[in-house]
Image (tube, rainbow, N blue to C red):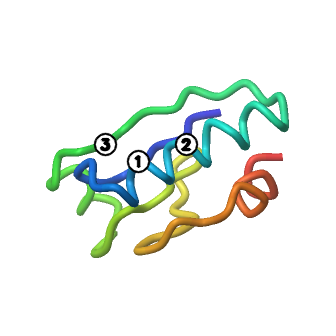
Amino acid sequence: MKIEILGTGCPKCRKLYENVQEAVRKTGVEAKITKVTNIADVSGYGVMMTPALVVDGQVKAAGKVPTTDDIMEWIK
């Protein structure tokens, strides 16, 4: 599984990264977590607001920080 955090590194982006790490740890799924900070790459996903979460190429959330529980549902 490939999980991408889209954003420039703001506090909300860092919180999303922490939530993703916790969700992966709790579910035990195999996942590669990457940060995408290049604005051109972010806009390539059609995302206008960050932070955003992409799971296996599908945008799951944009402009907000989803909870660990929400992320766990998306990656199961």
Residue drawn at (78%, 51%), measured in percent from left and top?
72
Q: CA distance from mark 2 to mark 3?
A: 15 Å
Residue at the disc numbered 1? 14
Q: CA distance from mark 1 to mark 3?
A: 12 Å
Mark 3 burial class by Cα count in 10 Å: few <14, some 14-19, many 20+? some
Eye-nearest disc, 2 or 3: 2
On the image, the x and y values in percent for residue 68 come to 71, 55
Mark 1–mark 2 CB contact (< 8 Å): yes
Relative to 5, 56 lies left or right: right
Residue at the disc numbered 3? 36
Please report whichever mark, 1 or 3, sits nearer to the chain's N-terminal start. 1
Q: Secondary structure at mark 3?
A: strand
Relative to 12, 73 lies left or right: right
Asked which quadrant contains residue 30, the reply is: top right
On the image, the x and y values in percent for residue 23 come to 73, 43
Mark 2–mark 3 CB contact (< 8 Å): no
The disc labelled 1 sits on which kind of residue? Arg
On the image, the x and y values in percent for residue 31 come to 65, 28
Residue at the disc numbered 2? 18
Please report whichever mark, 2 or 3, sits nearer to the chain's N-terminal start. 2
Q: How many marks?
A: 3
The disc labelled 3 sits on which kind of residue? Val
Relative to 43, 11 lies left or right: right
Eye-nearest disc, 1 or 3: 1
